[in-house]
Amino acid sequence: MATTSKSTTTSKEPTVSDLNDQIEALKSDIAKLTSLVGEIGTSKAAELRDVAKQKAKELRSEGERYAQEAGQMAQDSAEAALDAVRKQPATAIALAVGIGFLVGLVTSSRR
């Protein structure tokens, strides 16, 4: 026949006071974690704001450079047109008359 032996381990059952202490410790830990997460969020927000400001500054600088280049190109084109008119005034007048005639044909109403 098989015999069974009973194990006599005595484990201390937690008391209500122990459970209350653990709950308070958990509440404190959760409060600390909440605060830490808030601080991390604030820190990341500030970091992202700084990155966005830097990127905006770079883009603004690049836009200003492109605007200056476009202005210079427009000025160069205007100077080239004036030079062409000075060198060949008859051609410029004929071209202006021709363009005016074409615009007049396109915009006139046909009755």
Image (cartoon, rainbow, N blue to C red):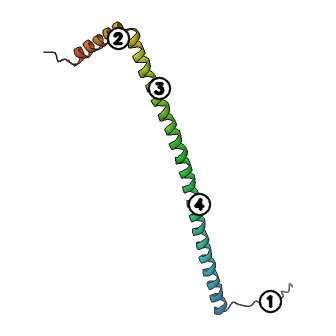
Marked residue nearer the N-terminal end (3 or 1)? 1
Instruction: From the top left corner, tell me how far across and down residue 67 is, in percent.
Output: 47, 35
Mark 2 or 1, which is nearer the eye? 2
* Camera-nearest residue between 26 and 53: 53
Label located before the other in sequence (2 or 3): 3
Q: Type of residue at label 2?
A: Ala
Residue at position x 35%, y 11% in the image: 92
Q: Which residue is mark 1?
A: 9
Tell me whether the residue at label 4 lies in contact with that at label 1, contact meaning CB atoms closer than 8 angstroms. no
Which residue is disc 3 drawn over?
73
Look at mark 4 in the image and give the residue it sits on: 44
Mark 4: give few (<14), some (14-19) or many (20+) Cα within 10 Å. Answer: few
Comparing labels 3 and 1, the label whose residue is closer to the camera: 3
Q: Label 1's element? A: loop
> Which mark is first along the chain, 2 or 4?
4
Please report contact status of discs 3 and 4: CB closer than 8 Å, yes or no: no
Sequence-first tag of 4 and 1: 1
